[in-house]
Amino acid sequence: EVQLVQSGAEVKKPGESLKISCKGSGYSFTTYWIGWVRQMPGKGLEWMGIIYPDDSDTRYSPSFQGQVTISADKSINTAYLQWRSLKASDTAMYYCVRRGIGVVNAIPVWYFDLWGRGTPVTVSS
Amino acid sequence: QSVLTQPPSVSGAPGQRVTISCTGSSSNIGAGFDVHWYQQLPGTAPKLLIYSNTNRPSGVPDRFSGSKSGASASLAITGLQAEDEADYYCQSYDSSLSGYVFGTGTKVTVL
């Protein structure tokens, strides 16, 4: 089965570090970009960044540049999202997504075709 | 803040048609970048609903349709059903931000 399996819920204190994971299976992990999306409680979706697991080429949203680190270990088909010092405002659900590729009118198109179930992160003192 | 604007909510009775707008600008939808739509049922992860403006992935009912014109796009749901009650998000690429952007999201309520 083609899927992205995310690590479990986390409860942390402000100032602590955290690394959550997203493991891909059922497809060639190294040939699809993997992104991360934040959803704060009761709010909408925010794109954080994306990584190409084969060479770890990474792009960040300006809103998240310097706030988080996205990485990947292609030997174990896993992408990561990491914080060095959490804040209460990091409390959210975090989804990993696969950037799929299709063809429309002979032109390649890209979209987020596969989503993990999400990792809830709670940061509270 | 999202650069793609959607109405916060729309509602309709079962069987009716509802539409959700997604308004962008010259650096995203207006620049020709594709618009995709996602459905988020309560308590679940989002799911791809429409890709590249008008295309449905396999398994998505044909009562969902998308369109795009200029710097805006729309999602239409015809024959509204109770199971369509969810949040809907548009998504595109923004050249000014050099990254992907989501819409503000629209909650669809079936009366």
Image: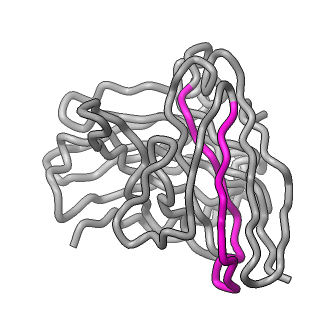
- The image shows residue B41, relative to residue A72, as above or below, that is below
* Nearer the observer, A5 or B56: B56
Q: Is residue B74 magenta?
A: yes
Magenta stretch, overall SS: strand
**Where is residue A58 drawn, in percent x and y?**
38, 27
**Where is residue A46 drawn, in percent x and y?**
64, 43
Determine the residue positioned at 43% across, 48% down: A112
Determine the residue positioned at 38% across, 72% down: B59
Determine the residue positioned at 33% across, 47% down: A79
Determine the residue positioned at 74% across, 57% down: B19
Start-end of magenta stretch: B72-93
Q: Is residue B100 visible?
A: yes
* Nearer the observer, A40 or B68: B68
- The image shows residue A1, relative to residue A124, as above or below, that is below
* Nearer the observer, A113 or B45: A113
Quadrant occupied by the C terminus of chain B? bottom right
Q: Is residue A9 magenta?
A: no
- The image shows residue A23, relative to residue A15, as above or below, that is below
Q: Is residue B33 left or right of residue B19?
A: left
